[in-house]
Image (cartoon, rainbow, N blue to C red):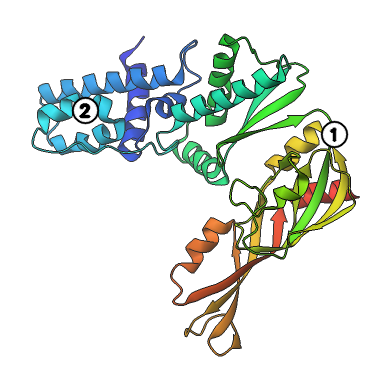
Amino acid sequence: MSKNSLDNLGEKALELLKKYPLCDSCLGRCFAKLGYRFANKERGKAIKTYLVLELDRKIKDHELEDLNEIKEILFNMGKEYSGIFDIYFSNEKFQERTCYICNSEIEEIKEDFFKKALDFLKKQGKVKYVLGVKLSEQLSRLENEFIFSNGLIYYESIRNEIKREVGKMLAKEGYEPCIENPDIDIIYDLGTRSIYTISKKYKTLYLYSRLSRRVPISSWYGKDSLEEEFNGKEILVPFTEPSEVRILDEYPLIISDEDREKIEAKGYFLRKIGKIAGREISAIMTAKPEKRIYSVLIYSKEEIGERVLGNIRLLTVEARDFKELKEKLKDIKGEIISIDLIESEGKHKILENKLTS
């Protein structure tokens, strides 16, 4: 092997660590398609170890004019690699940073998914299953931007790593995933740290609007919830808005063992679209709005939006999601009275139209 090939890999890793704090797994995943039978954590650890040795060599051979050049790199590698920092910066404190991609939580996530899936499988008995991971919109967007902005051609998604590693852990317990013809998908939702299942049996798709405020769908977020209406039936929520936001557009909701044509409960209005299964469920669960339009009522002395009464004003704001909406509103001087979601656009609407036609 030529020295240049090692240099190229090392230089790419160094380039990443100059910009981002990365745990062993997330750095290793940047080179996941190189080598076989290595865990990404092992790849990342090997790369960081090589870089620490190379940086120390450059210092000893006087190839680095300014030692401060390596500070950020060492901080971004993590505390485990702080040995040479303690030697060359003995009077300074090492900065511990969380991983840019997983927030230094990937091992905790794998363990949590494993325990919850194992508990489910023990209760179900022998069942043919595959694993899935639902990323939050924020993480999915961050990961895609990270891949493309850094030209990472050997990258593996965090979703695939979690599925594979948890699958191996479950297999050791006697519950090996069944890729061909599974009965169910066991999905881990990274946003809520919970699991749900998608059965090959039929479920019912509803479209809902919400005129109430502070009544969440899931009892996870509050005792007074829509979930109470369904007495423990499984509810799948592809996406929603915070409970203080009214939803005047129609959002999808998937419910097991439910067949009512119309449901009114706790300020929610649901209308039945029809029975769905398998790929239709997966497609709906992964289709998110590309654009959302919010109506924001605000008390402000600034001349903004449409004046309703006195200093009460109405703004119409377009955003990708609620997080981006908050970012757009943060510099407005005033007090927010209420927020309503009035319209959304994206693949979910295309799917809904297909299923209703």
Extreme residue toward the left, this view:
91
**Label 2 belongs to which residue?**
82
Q: In front: 323, or 22?
A: 323
Q: Is residue 115 above or below residue 353?
A: above
Quarter where residue 89 is shown:
top left
Q: Is residue 38 above or below residue 209?
A: above
Q: Earlier in the sequence, mark 1 or mark 2?
A: 2
- Residue 202 — which label? 1
Q: Residue at x 80, y 38 (%)?
A: 256
Alpha-carbon span between mark 1 and mark 2: 54 Å
- Please name the amino acid that badge 1 sits on: Tyr
Q: Is residue 155 visible?
A: no
Q: Residue at x 59, y 86 (%)?
A: 307
Mark 1, secondary structure of its residue: loop
Q: Residue at x 14, y 34 (%)?
A: 67
Would you call the spot at circle 1 few (<14 residues within 10 Å), some (14-19), or many (20 or more)? some
Q: Is residue 55 visible?
A: yes
CB contact under 8 Å: marks 1 and 2: no
Quarter where residue 21 is shown:
top left
30 left or right of 51 in image? right
